[in-house]
Image: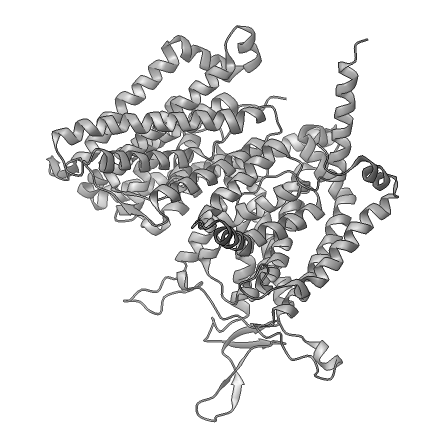
Amino acid sequence: MTSAVAARGGRLAKLGLVNSVGLVFVGLGIAWLIWNIVDGPRLFARLLVGGLSNGALFALIALGYTMVYGIIELINFAHGDLFMLGAVMGAIMLEQWFGQTKSSPTGWILLAVAMLGAMAFCAAVNVVIERFAYRRLRNAPKLAPLITAVGVSFILQNIGIRINGSAPHSRTSVLPTKEISVGGVGIRVAYIVVIAITVPLLLFMTWLVQKTKIGKAMRATAQDRDAARLMGIDVDKIISFTFALGGALAGAAGMLFVEVNRRTSYDLGFRLGLIAFTAAVLGGVGNLLGAVIGGVFIGVIQALNDGAPHGLGQEWTQTVMFSILILMIIFRPGGLFGKHAQEKV
Amino acid sequence: MTIIPQGARSTWNSLPPVARTAIPAVLLMALAIAGPQLASGPTGWLPITTLVFCAVYALFSMGLNIVVGYAGLLDLGYVAFFLFGAYVAAWLMSDFWYTRSIHILDAAHKVIDPTTHQPVSAQGIHLSFWIVMVVAALVAAIGGVIIGWPTLRLKSDYLALVTLGFGEILPEVFRNADFRTVSNPDALNLTNGTKGIGPLDPIGNGFLRHLTNGVIPKAVTPSDYRAKYYIILIFVVLFVYVSIKLRGGKLGRAWLAIREDELAASLMGVPLMRTKLWSYAIGAAAGGFAGTFYATTVGIVNVDTFIFSFSIIILCAVILGGMGNVWGAIVGGVVITWFNYTGLVWIGEKMNSALGTKVKLKDYEFGFFGMILVLMMLFRPQGLIPAARQKQVQELERQIEQQEVVPT
């Protein structure tokens, strides 16, 4: 008994320390931002737009992670690789099947078609993965589905190697390469297109989850699977639907990624997936709006780190991203806005 | 379910427990000692280099077995500890710090002095392999505690992610820790960047040479894979013993308790943090230790070796063999290593010549390892050689199920 009390006291004392250390990190981050703004406001604005566009893509991927985690408490390691497959399939459809390599109105329409194709493809793949790999393990010890997810990620990467090649593959884009000037700051048209497509998608998602009947069923399943089943919800179907939705968003993100970055590689998903997961953690896993904000935040930080005058440069991107991930998980596992939920006993 | 005939099974089960452990152990040992005799040429089914790697990977997977198998902590960045071990070996056993010249019981090569034409000791820090081995294990254990201390209080899935993050950060830090540029060639260089560090000194034979009046050479020559294999085998056996002792001891039982039910374990008075940290430290020490063997076997330490798939291949070995069982870890490690280094190519060639196909099986490596993970988790989560305890639990569950089915 006494030891329990002592442990509690120790824990409280540690929490105080942990919070103050966390605040120091936040303070340092803000100071670094201001330093970059002061030293190059033009460049900062330019990077900000690029970061927002990348962040929008991260948000799309992060949503897939967060929804799946919310509903079956599984970190779906394969989700990033699904995004990679979406990118590769989208690029193949647009370039090879439709033969579009230049910016033209036909190209733009077919881009929309290819994007829908990539979304459908990824949704289907994700549903199949859930059906054959994860469903059987829903009640297994927690390690089992995690390890399975890692295995699925490897299988998807192998598929990526088969259809994309083991070396990075440069792709063409149907979006115009030119920049438009807003207040003296050059902004790539592609970035604007990405933001213009992503924002409605995200709004649609929010509407779907918050306002529709199936969204209500999703939230119910996430809260208590057994109770949801008793209320007449077909839990299996809802989980499949969630995977389909997450897959579709990953497919959309993949297609847009190719249009902006003009390259694909089989290991694209592993890195970007983890960065997107960082975004999900930042916003609080399971929190849809949080994932979006986290994605944008991470996108901007990455852009600044890679290009700003006081950034560490591209060779340190992963270190910065994963440090944020680790610090977040240690100091605020509930996300920037979430409360740290007590684990159910 | 069962492949083995019922009669053989019951005879086996009627043997005393000591025999049931000793017989496979002796058979395995005999096979291991005979290994180099079974080995084929470099293009055959078992090149001797593959055999050496099998032994090294057996060490790796036994180390990971302590973390994942015994304590149930999913570590997806175990490669970080190999990296520690390998770089400690690289720093202490090569010409890398060429501005110094420190030699302790080393077996380093000699260089000819250009002015006196006499052989002199090479530049750099050169320590005896046997010292480096211990240092590397200690460094990795400290690394494990540093990584583990803030992260081990996390839930299992977050822990997996954080270890993965560390496993990605460390290679990047080591890759970037060469700050020399064209304009500043004298800047700090800790790791030689992507070029790597090498060649490493050979393993010294030390006092054995004096004992045998110089019959045994001063050091194991880099191409003497047979000697390397037997040296590593000694440590594999040693580590099997340590693993079994740990598993049966107080610490091992505490690990199992945490693995099965963390809350219940803490209520029974198991100190969670300390117990988990020990598993991390011991697993890390084994990883660092094996990392030095890996480094001396390869002869050059390059950061691009220590990537995520390395961690996953070791995880694959532990899962395939059976989590929580040291024999499983060894068998898994050997089988996976064989497939990784030789098996896939060899089987692919055999298949192509037999069927006239042109499949490069090596291209399906990732899918192969991924499939193993998925299929094992789906159909045989206890592994090929399940831990004895796991079997008992299953037997109990089966009995309970039968009782429930029988109508009263």
What residue do we see at 63% from left, 34% from top?
Answer: A10
Q: Is residue B212 visible?
A: yes
Tell me: A131 left or right of A283: right
- Name the outermost residue toward the bottom: B116
Q: Quadrant of the N terminus of chain A?
A: top right
Tell me: A46 left or right of B273: left
B122 and A337: which is toward the camera: B122
Q: Quadrant of the C terminus of chain A?
A: top right
A118 and A341: which is toward the camera: A118
Residue B308 locus on image (x, y percent): 48, 47
- Name the outermost residue toward the front: B355
Residue B188 locus on image (x, y percent): 40, 65
Residue A120 sits above or below residue B150 on the image: above
- Name the outermost residue toward the top: A231
What residue do we see at 41% from left, 57% from top?
Answer: B175
A89 and A79: which is toward the camera: A89
Residue A50 locus on image (x, y percent): 24, 37
